[in-house]
Image (cartoon, helix red, strand yellow):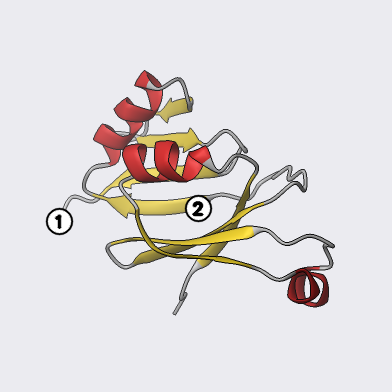
Amino acid sequence: MIKHIGLTISNIQEIYDFYGQIMGFEKVKQFPLYREVAQNIFGYDESPEVFLLKKGSVELEIFVSLQKYKPAWSHICLEIPDAREIFTKAREHNYRTIFKENDKGGTFFISDSSNNLFELKPDKR
């Protein structure tokens, strides 16, 4: 069972704009990751601010960092009832959005300003 997923962003405003307003996550807590801990665990010599966000049973641990992060194939797939609404909000706020048609109606892709990619599938339960 996955407890949380850690992501890196470079702009703290994304916590509120993308993850809060667009995706609907709520902030659970915020804390600094001490430089020594960051160095020992992740190998980076900085002290990023960390936000724990939650939506339903999904938890994200977002690191606001100066490190440049370039994801290649990494993405997070969420099966959620409001996939279309999130996609529409992201498009309206000029975030990168892609719609891929398929035999089940389609899959939505959106990414934040740091290129963290989310695959959104409508939950039809």
The percent coordinates of residue 65 (x first, y second) are 69, 50
SS at badge 1: loop
Instruction: State whether residue 104 appears in this view.
Output: no
Provide the residue designation for mark 2: 76
Residue neighbourhood size for the residue with mark 1, other residues' Cα within 10 Å, grouped as few (<14), some (14–19), many (≥20): few
Q: In terms of sequence position, does the residue under pointer 1 or pointer 2 come before the other?
A: 2
Residue neighbourhood size for the residue with mark 2, other residues' Cα within 10 Å, grouped as few (<14), some (14–19), many (≥20): few
Say which quadrant the C terminus sits in.
Answer: bottom left
Say which quadrant the N terminus sits in.
Answer: bottom left
SS at badge 2: strand
Q: Residue at x 41, y 45 (%)?
A: 19
Q: Is residue 96 rendered to the left or right of residue 87?
A: right
Amino acid type, mark 2: Ile
Amino acid type, mark 1: Arg
Instruction: State whether residue 46 appears in this view.
Output: yes
Which is nearer the eye, 82 or 28?
Answer: 28
The percent coordinates of residue 100 (x first, y second) are 42, 30
The percent coordinates of residue 9 (x first, y second) are 61, 46
Q: Residue at x 23, y 43 (%)?
A: 82
Provide the residue designation for mark 1: 125
Which is nearer the eye, 63 or 4?
Answer: 63
Which callout, 1 or 2, points to the residue nearer the camera?
2
